[in-house]
Image (cartoon, rainbow, N blue to C red):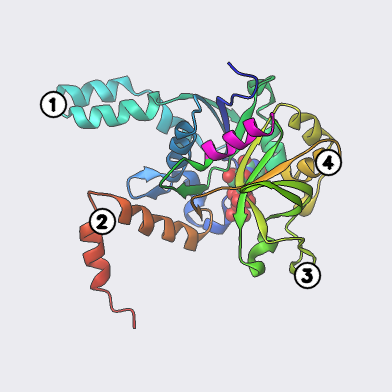
Amino acid sequence: MGKYDVKRAVIPCAGKGTRFLPVTKGTPKEMCPIVDKPTLDYIVDECIDGGITNILIILSEGKDDIRRYYHNDVDYEKELIEKGKTEFASIIHNVANKANFYFTVQHELLGLGHAVLQAKEFIKNENFIVCCGDDICTYEGDAPSKQLIEAFKKTNGHTIVGGQKVKHEMISKYGCMDINREESARLYSLKGIVEKPNIEEAPSDLASLGKWVFNSKIFDYIEKTPKGKGGEIQLTDAIALMIKDEPVYFYDFVGKRYDCGDKLGYLKAIVDVALKRDDLKDSFKEFLKEKDFR
Ligand code: UTP
């Protein structure tokens, strides 16, 4: 394996999903379906498209539905084969076998930085991508995960913050980039990064959108990070500490991103995914055309 190869992914899914109550009282938001696949599975597939083979999912207590979904259910598979339903048998076989899945529990919800820290043992000295469990992307060309991993290689293994430009009035919802300069197309070196700034103080409209590529040094910085906004250990604050010591980059990835932890973002994802599906798009378009939006 090359020094800058990235084969491992960490997907934090421990959050409470308060914005999505009441369903998240009983079901993890990452398991809410977009057509016929859980939200999380789109992220898993994007990681696999980016060349990832080993995936660690960070859970919290009560999120066992996620573990169960990726369990290799050989009895059910056998039952479907015996009934002649081989197509369905291969669907469930593929879910459990498309990557190597690992799980760990974040016992106290102390923030995204703390969630990533739970991956320290799993990562050891390797490089890894982090993708939030509620942020999905649709894309025509390379998967955003692949674009970020390519950027990581190009910068000889320095941290890559993945994101995009957002509307100015939205920037205070995100980690915001303080740009040093544009190094090449879509790749920017950073002077700083600020978690959820006030609009007046935001240094740019470039927002961190739920994907990062790191080497294992990030764990040292998370361990040094004090509690920040909301009393949580923020991943953005750990990256801000890292920027003081070494180059860190932002990559403006190509792809349409949906915040599925937000009700409107989730609805938009369902509509757009359905409109891309060969088995649904024509009849779904017909249905939408019949709507009277006046
Ligand atoms: P969010 O803030 O979007 O998730 O965190 P949340 O906490 O579930 O959201 P609300 O505000 O309560 O609705 C971004 C990502 O970080 C994970 C979440 O699961 C989500 O994927 N996360 C957050 C953790 O894994 N652990 C934490 O302590 C916090």
Number of the front mark, 1 or 2: 2
Of callouts 2 and 3, the N-terminal one: 3
Of callouts 1 and 2, the N-terminal one: 1
The kind of secondary structure element at disc 3 is helix
The residue indicated by pointer 2 is 281
Q: Kindly identify the residue that appears in the image at 36 percent across and 43 percent down.
A: 37
Q: How many angstroms separate mark 4 from mark 1 (CA)?
A: 57 Å
The residue indicated by pointer 1 is 84
Is 156 left or right of 95, judged from the image as shown?
A: right
The residue indicated by pointer 3 is 200
The residue indicated by pointer 4 is 241
Query: Residue 129's x, y, as percent?
Result: 60, 33
Q: Rate crowding at label 3 as few (under 14), some (14 to 19) or many (20 or more) other CA atoms within 10 Å.
A: few
Of callouts 3 and 1, the N-terminal one: 1
Please give the range of residues in magenta.
145-156
Q: How many angstroms separate mark 2 from mark 4 (CA)?
A: 47 Å
Q: Kindly identify the residue that appears in the image at 59 percent across and 24 percent down.
A: 5
Query: Residue 203's x, y, as percent?
Result: 77, 61
Q: Rate crowding at label 2 as few (under 14), some (14 to 19) or many (20 or more) other CA atoms within 10 Å.
A: some
Give the residue type that dot 2 points to: Lys
Q: Rate crowding at label 4 as few (under 14), some (14 to 19) or many (20 or more) other CA atoms within 10 Å.
A: some
